[in-house]
Amino acid sequence: MAGLAAGEPALRLEGVTKLFGTVTAVDGVDLAIAEGEFFSLLGPSGCGKSTLLRMMAGLESPSAGRILIGGADMTGTPAYGRPVNMMFQSYALFPHMSVEDNIAFGLRQDGVKRAEIRERVAAMLALVQLEGLGRRRPGQLSGGQRQRVALARCLVKRPKVVLLDEPLAALDKRLRQRTQFELMRIQNEVGLTFVMVTHDQEEAMTLSTRIAVMENGRILQVGRPRDIYERPAGRQVADFIGTANFFEGTAAGYRDGHLAVAVEGLAAPLLAALDGESGDRAGGPVTLMVRPERIALSRTPPAGTDAVLTGTVAAVAYHGDASQYRVELAGGRSVLVTAANFGHDAAAIDRGEAVFLAIPPSAARVVP
Ligand SMILES: Nc1ncnc2c1ncn2[C@@H]1O[C@H](COP(=O)(O)OP(=O)(O)OP(=O)(O)O)[C@@H](O)[C@H]1O
Ligand SMILES: [Mg+2]
């Protein structure tokens, strides 16, 4: 297959829309995915992720818009003419064929020579660490091993872009974590562009160079995991990615390079990072987001200049490495706080205790 033109994104979507009758599954999506990226499409069930991926694969044709692969317009090119390969959630392995034959299938169809097929299949078995299992049938493998066969079958044709639809969804939690690392290693080794659909935000954060968060067929935000987590483009994104506390308030002015926001029921204003924004918000309504791990919880009043709230612990969820606390403030509002658990013997804060919450200035972010 021809290399991609230099400087062109591996994949570019321009105004891509897909209608099924009266349902708008994908609604005017623009996207540029660079070569070598591990890019994820993340969003709730029914938001259009699979439909978007299938259009990239050529398995579904857009109602409007263009799809360019390596700079070439492939909107009208059928799946077999595109330098992409898709791995389906169900794996779709042939049950009556051996692992080797499953991996070799596409190459045989393309008329690749037998010696080359043997070589490439062996290399794939090594890559996915299934050496010695080539003669087995899919039914004689574990779920994780089957998943790796499906990946090998997808990669053996050396596609420029690998499309993965919920590749790990069928695996249990531990195997999924192990396989995530496998997938990262393989992507590093082969250096291809991966586009993955998932509704698991942790998985998207772990694997991706960038994530597109989708809802109702539209993209709400595209960014690196850290950007999306720290600087969500709106409340929907902040809510979908991780846990967030929201405070509605009024901008009271600027202080030490921060925006001071007066929140009803809080004695002190919260200081939000300005993030380079200019313009005067004073007097206007502001929504702030504070992640639970950015709030410090203590039994005694904290020293320093942080905004301090007081409340009572209403619930504690122990997760081993950390605990999550729901703290009820005097006005009836509750705030979620996460704190790492360092020792076995530290006197843990319990339900019913009176506590102080300290929110440092940079912890609060203005939600656009
Ligand atoms: N062939 C089809 N005919 C009619 N409607 C469809 C078809 N395929 C998908 N849809 C609709 O388009 C919307 C998006 O579906 P899609 O499968 O892309 O969602 P998804 O984000 O992949 O969801 P999930 O996480 O549940 O797999 C849904 O409302 C779905 O019902
Ligand atoms: Mg889907």
Image (tube, rainbow, N blue to C red):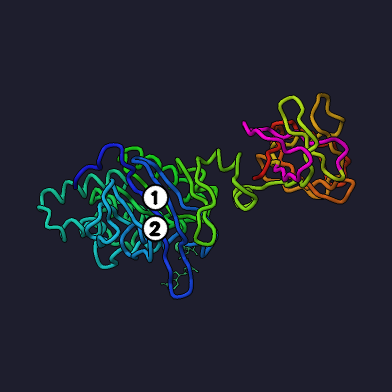
Q: Position of residue 174 (x, y in %)?
A: 51, 49
Report the span colored magenta. Answer: 266-289
Quadrant holding the C terminus:
top right
Residue 20 image-quadrant placement:
bottom left
Asked whether residue 328 is in view, the answer is yes
165 left or right, relative to 301: left
Residue at the image point whose x is 68% and y is 40% from the top? 366
Queried on whether the Cβ of the residue with tag 2 lies below 8 angstroms from ligand 1, the answer reads: yes
349 left or right, relative to 367: right
240 left or right, relative to 25: right
Location of residue 353 with respect to 358 vertically, above or below: below
Q: Position of residue 67 (x, y in %)?
A: 33, 55
257 left or right, relative to 51: right
Element under disc 2? helix
Q: Position of residue 310 (x, y in %)?
A: 87, 39
Q: Position of residue 121 (x, y in %)?
A: 21, 50
Residue at the image point whose x is 46% and y is 62% from the top? 26
Residue 284 included in the magenta stretch of the image: yes
Residue 345 image-quadrant placement:
top right
**Which residue extends farthest bottom?**
21
Local packing at callout 2 (Cα closer than 10 Å; few below 14, some 14-19, many 20+) is many
Residue in front for this viewpoint, 125 or 198: 198
Local packing at callout 1 (Cα closer than 10 Å; few below 14, some 14-19, many 20+) is many
Majority SS type along the magenta span: loop
Residue 291 image-quadrant placement:
top right
Asked whether residue 143 is in view, the answer is no
**Which residue extends farthest front?**
279
Location of residue 177 with respect to 143 vertically, above or below: above
Residue type at tag 1: Val
The residue that mark 1 highlights is 195
Contact between labelled residues 2 and 1, with CB atoms less than 8 Å apart: yes
The residue that mark 2 highlights is 53
